[in-house]
Image: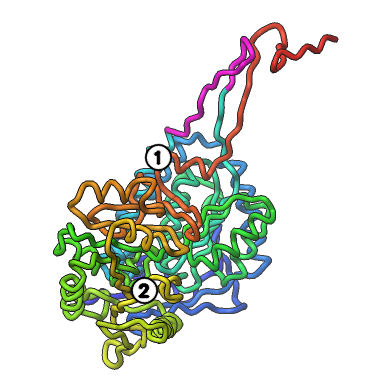
Amino acid sequence: MKPDINSILAQLGIAGYNPSYSTGSKWSHAANGEHIHSMSPVDGQKISSVFAASLEEYDHVISTAQEAYKYWNKVPAPKRGEIVRQFGDALRKQKTALGTLVSYEMGKSLQEGLGEVQEMIDICDFAVGLSRQLYGLTMHSERPNHRMYEQWHPLGVVGIISAFNFPVAVWSWNAALAWVCGNVCVWKPSEKTPITAIACQRIAEEVFAANDIPEGVSNLIIGDAEIGKLLSADTRVPLVSATGSTRMGKAVAMQVANRLGKTILELGGNNAIIISKDADLDMSLIGAVFGAVGTAGQRCTTTRRLIIHESVYETFKAKLVKAYGQLRIGNPLDQNNHVGPLIDKDAVNAYLASIEKCKAEGGKFVVEGGVLEGGEYSSGCYVKPCIAEVENHYEIVQHETFAPILYLIKYNDLEEAIALQNGVPQGLSSAIMTLNLREAEQFLSAQGSDCGIANVNIGTSGAEIGGAFGGEKETGGGRESGSDAWKAYMRRQTNTINYSNTLPLAQGIKFDL
């Protein structure tokens, strides 16, 4: 039975036309300006529309956030953590509705949509713990009768730019941590998934209002790339956390760096799994197929490349081809289906162009791609997951396509496999499938994977709550969780206290007056 989308929209506070911004309980009342129409890739139907924010509205949101910061940074961190705990509980109550909306607006399977909301809940629990662990250190000074220590203070306004492929989790991972650190947040969601963002703000609105928190601690502003540019260039926003394409991340990084601000970036992946001659091939198959086709290949941690030992290459290729023949493509709200749609027709065109480029460079497709038409595929966004035999140096292999295209590469020895794994500009997630302890340890060593995430026998997973969401090279260095993740949302200050009745100078300098 398919969910009733209209009742879910009503439950989450979504109207036919929605405001362009919110500062908490106050929403814009714009009656003009451009509209952003959210179209579901599931069935091609319009979900709802949103007004696009103007420059004046943007300035209002930032000014409101600045005022709220004066209040919020005075609230004790454990109290801030308590509000985040309540937000996590509110998400628990709305998990089914919000997860369903994620699936319908973005196109990922229902289980993945529900899983994304669970990530939001988990990060809230994690942030609550961190709210009592914003520790500094006492350090020794060369000066006698002095005490030196470090403190961590909030930064102020944190800008959050999120991508369509994780339309709600990225925001919460940043916001929950930023809030417990004493910052206020301004969220600019992807213009492709604005409705889920409004739903999140509606849930947060109730929690903040129940605790008499003033306007401006949780802010939402909806618009196109121009709003992202405003956030990046705004000296009132000391930190911008951006998730999305490498192209977008580079633009944000340059703008923020130009004003000497701070960034947290989590960008492209191009992730690989090494399939060793000593791998459990059945387990490897599960990890590879799910990694490659889950969310229709639109995760930053999607498996893009399989680097397979030559002795098991043909055997594993045959297993893959058979498994791909069993994939069920269709409405992601139907839990019998494995693969849903791409986000829109632009993504479909990029998928088709990548296939043609791969063939032109010499790629041999063992499972052909293509666009599905008619019936439940009427949105034009459903495509066939495909597999091509390639060489790692192909230009198309070096470039990440957000679609279910899997590349097969053959290797002879582990050093070669690791070099192939590392031989792309991106550096997010990586994995080796092996029962050989030496191979596993070499892969995890300094001479192994150069990615921020390196796994053994689990595929190219993403962030785990409490662990680093690493990202080297063109992935941007991003991390959003981990025991010390809070430090990225704060500034460190060194304090020295002289408790003597003299003023001894450093390095024994004498300065007698």
Q: Residue furthest bottom?
A: 374
Residue drawn at (47%, 62%), measured in percent from left and top?
A: 267
x, y percent for residue 450? 41, 53
Instruction: Judge whether 499 appears above or below 5 on screen.
Output: above
Does residue 136 belong to the magenta stretch? yes
- Was residue 116 drawn as part of the magenta stretch in this picture? no
Work out whether residue 111 or residue 462 is closer to the camera in this orientation and state it. Answer: 462
In the figure, residue 293 lies in which quadrant? bottom left
Tell me where residue 281 appears, x and y as whole percent. Answer: 16, 63
Which kind of residue does numbered mark 1 sit on? Answer: Ser
Q: Name the residue under label 1.
A: 483
Cα distance, mark 2 to mark 1? 39 Å
Q: Is residue 374 visible?
A: yes
The circle drawn on residue 391 is: 2
Amino acid residing under circle 2: Glu
- Residue 424 vertical placement versus 261 (above, below): below
Q: Are marks 2 and 1 in contact (CB under 8 Å)?
A: no
Query: Residues in magenta?
Result: 133-148
Give residue 471's mark.
none
